[in-house]
Amino acid sequence: MEFSIKSGSPEKQRTACIIVGIHEPRKLSAAAKSIDAASKKALSNLIRRGDIEGKIGQSLLLHNVPGMLCDRVLLVGCGRERDLDELQYCKIIENSIKALNTTGSSDAVSYLSELNVKGRDHNWKISLGVETINHVLYQFKEFKSKNKRPRKTLKKFILTVPSRRELTSGDQAAKIAVSVSKGVKLSRDLGNRPANICTPTHLATQAQQLAKTYKSLKVKVLEEAAMKKLEMNSLLSVSQGSAEPAKLIVMEHNGGKKNAKPIVLVGKGVTFDTGGISIKPSPAMDEMKYDMCGAASVIGTMCAIADMGLALNVVGVVPAVENMPSSTATKPGDIFTTMSGQTIEVLNTDAEGRLILCDALTYSERFNPEAVVDIATLTGACVMALGSHATGLLSNHNPLAKDLLHAGETSCDRAWQLPLWDEYQQQLDSPFADFANIGGREAGTITAACFLSRFAKKFHWAHLDIAGTAWNSGKNKCATGRPVPLLTRFLLDRAG
């Protein structure tokens, strides 16, 4: 869809639909007041009769409003003006697009970007508006044999700024948001594809195709033979039960100074997770195709920053495997030597994500990184602790953690920090190896991060557990594309 930025009063806009806000209780926004004046109190009369209160979730579509050049006016409830914050703003935009999508409008002009959100400027509102609109309109129909298209689709969307002074910066904010949306869409597409299509080889192919599209990207794919030479025995222990060969995908975006240290993103890419010999229960096992959403978020983020031409050096490292039970699969109690030389007793083959991430973290040392962030659908314990609202965050460097938390707040893709105290490390003790791959039932998210921290001692590191945020379950199950917005905002902040 085409996005553009414009200034001007609503009564002068020739468009299929104009979108304005109504605050609770029955209070016109500034743009709505302009329409009310041009229409000789048409909106005031409607509101006085109680057609719309202004509560969030409400909307009212009006046709042929007097004094207007547009075909329709869509009134959208915005709640109490003093309570309007970032998350409510996103809900308002989401509700407006859902209502607009039922009208058959091919274009629209929205004045919702002029709402007063505490502490946020017009650029933020435009950026979040574009990202939210694209998120709401996303559909995954690659495998539908009958793909019915609506009579009319929304093709052009205009967001407004108060004056011409904000046009240039608003346009730049919209362009960045379009790039972020491309990355989110790619991440969601990869996550939603079934595991018989989205294999480790498929992920590698997708990364290679991005390198053909963007000159700033270089992609290298390590095969199992190369990983064996590097002694990535922990990573290969997960793939040894599958007919699908493992891949280590390395994506380099060289947008910064030649010798500047890069940020490294490491994404867990288990394209299907049966649990291995420690097999999972059958209910909802189909959703284990989403166990590669960490990898998808890294590939999506690399797409976004390449598309926007970000002036920063970033490396994406994606260990991609399939975890299957077979006669060659890893057995509980097996011991492997990692690329770092540390030994692991595998007590649970369903705790496989950390087994591929640990070798990928060691591999990341060769880039002499400024910081390393790994992203993984790692623990069910994180879902129990934080639900689907916040990503779990643990780190060995508080300034890095704060930067990620701030990026999450700005992008409305929030994270919550959990402790990484030494007291938890002893839960990983093993009588036969340097340590085990699980630490018992208690504090599962923290002990999983403790495991990874043992491979991140040479750099500043943070771990994002996205088990609760990477996809929605149930009837409307779908990949969310999180935390691509958080990661891109973090990188944008780093690039200044």
Image (tube, rainbow, N blue to C red):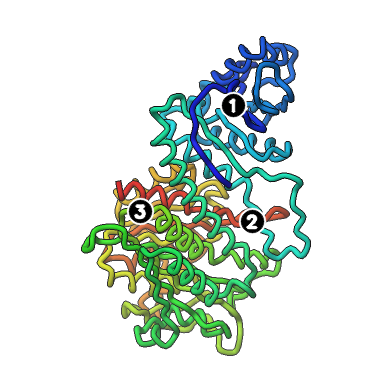
| Residue drawn at the location 49% of the way across and 35% of the way down | 5
Direction from residue 374 to residue 201 in the image, left or right = right
The front one of 414 and 17 is 17
Q: Which numbered disc, 2 or 3, marks the residue that appears first in the sequence?
A: 3
Please state which amino acid type lies under the numbered disc 1.
Gln
Pointer 1: what residue?
13
What is the tally of numbered marks visible in this picture?
3
Pointer 3: what residue?
310
Question: Are the two marked residues, 2 and 3, in contact with CB atoms closer than 8 angstroms?
Answer: no
State how far apart marks 2 and 3 are (Cα). 29 Å
Question: Are the two marked residues, 3 and 1, in contact with CB atoms closer than 8 angstroms?
Answer: no
The circle drawn on residue 478 is: 2
The picture quadrant where one finds residue 20 is top right
Q: Secondary structure at mark 1?
A: loop
| Residue drawn at the location 51% of the way across and 50% of the way down | 181
Q: Secondary structure at mark 3?
A: loop
Direction from residue 56 to residue 437 in the image, left or right = left
Q: Is residue 219 above or below residue 50?
A: below
